[in-house]
Amino acid sequence: MKKSIIANVMPEETRVAVLEDSQLMEIAVERSDSGHLVGNIYKGKVKNVLPGMQAAFVDIGRDKNAFLYMGDAGRQAACRHLTVGQDILVQIAKDAMGEKGPRATISLTLPGRYIVFMPTVDYIGISRRIEDEPERERLRQLAEKIRPAGMGVIVRTVAAGKSQEELVNDMAYLTNMWSSLSARAKRIQAPALIYRDADLVVRIVRDYLTSDIAEFIIDSQEAYTRVIDLLKYTSPELAGCVRLYEQASGPDNDLFSRFNIEAKLESLRNRRVELACGGYLVIDYTEALTVIDVNTGKFIGNTNLSETVFQTNLEAVAEIARQLRLRDIGGIIIIDFIDMAKAEQRSAVLTALELELKKDRTKSNVLGITSLGLVEMTRKKARQNINGMLYDQCPCCWGRGRIKSPATVVIDIKRELRKLNKRPRTGGRLVIQVHPQVAHFLNRQGELKRLEQETARALAVEAAHTLNPELFSLLWKPD
């Protein structure tokens, strides 16, 4: 499998796509004004403590206070007896979303190339993607040897096969950073930013660029130079896969168009996702969870109904796993596979789903199938997903996906006119200002004449293209 990373860098926005055999698998977007906070460390001030919720709100100097769930901090002494006005170091674990402020944790992490340093907890972890037991044990012993006493480390996937010297150097860099941050935190007055996480390009190098990446193409000279300089220090053996894209003349020769990524990005707005077999998925977002429905569509199979359903569900599994990564869907996810009568088929689909999700860097958990045949799962949610970042709610339906029909709006107009009929009359003509679709409905089949007869008023309809299809205005105009 050929894996590629494609980076489109502009002053206002950076977009990074991950391709596997030319298929778009992941997309990350970061804007200069997006307010992305995940990974940032703040010296905050406790504003409110809620013992009944095991939570506190911490002022970090932003528009919204950060929510600190004390259960996340385990038995850490710093979180046992929080008081209003107390200074505390917190790291943002989840960006603000909707009406909710950012979520913070007291378990600080500083990611390096091979190690994630955890200065506030006593812990050793090895990436679950390293499956070779002797290598896991070697890295565990090495981590125990190089970590500062009482502090924690997580050994990252890219550390597999690396020498002790490479991990020691990474550890030294991170401990020096922590010393600098600690000193700054003691000097500065809360609330204040103590540490800002790296930008998207650097995070991609740090978190994604491994030996299985065939090419990393960047269309910015400045970003390209930064990546090469960073790799000289961290992983010089990977510098050869990085190249600068020099755009040819013409509107369709920019980097994302060259790899047909722009068109694929547009499809992320669609609820419906087609499957190669003729079936399809329908993806719906709600405040609480995401629902994915699987349908056979045009697929009729070659054997029997049971096998057709099973094959559709199996194909849906791979596409569902891809869409979760591509759209960065997090939180609670419910999957409504097509009903399968055989227990072994249900088990095979669940197993296939778990295997596909192992390819995903973001942690997920498949909980099983309910009595209604729905698959329950969760996927870690740290930031606003791609749809939330790129698109606003529709100003007509405000995200409901439905607006009043012209017939419903006309009934609303009739209801308002009947109220007006009970008030003292004034001279002039009453103009009904509506969207053109509603105007067409009013003018057809003598609807307006019937309204004039019922209300005993002179009425006129005025089509306003800029008016919300659900709204109308009643205006008096002199004769």
Image (spheres, rainbow, N blue to C red):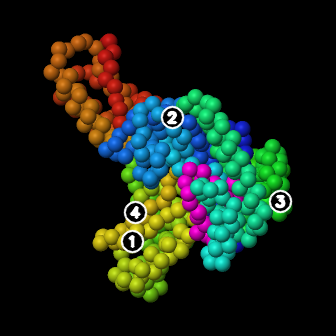
The image's mark for residue 368 is: 1
Instruction: Residue under label 2, please give it.
Output: 87
- Magenta segment range? 112-130
Which residue is at the front of the view, 315 or 94? 94
Which residue is at the front of the view, 257 or 156? 156
The image's mark for residue 236 is: 3
| Residue 228, magenta (yes or no) | no
User: Dot 4, how many residues are within 10 Å of its Cα: few (below 14), some (14-19), or many (20+)?
Assistant: some
Dot 4 or dot 2: first in sequence order is 2
Dot 2 or dot 1: first in sequence order is 2
User: Dot 2, how many residues are within 10 Å of its Cα: few (below 14), some (14-19), or many (20+)?
Assistant: some
Instruction: Residue under label 4, please give it.
Output: 334
Distance from Cα at disc 3 to Cα at disc 4: 43 Å
Q: Amino acid at mark 2?
A: Asp
Dot 4 or dot 1: first in sequence order is 4
Q: Amino acid at mark 3?
A: Pro
Distance from Cα at disc 4 to Cα at disc 2: 40 Å
Image quarter of the C terminus: top left
Distance from Cα at disc 3 to Cα at disc 1: 44 Å
In the rendered image, residue 122, in percent from the top left (x then y), is placed at: 56, 57
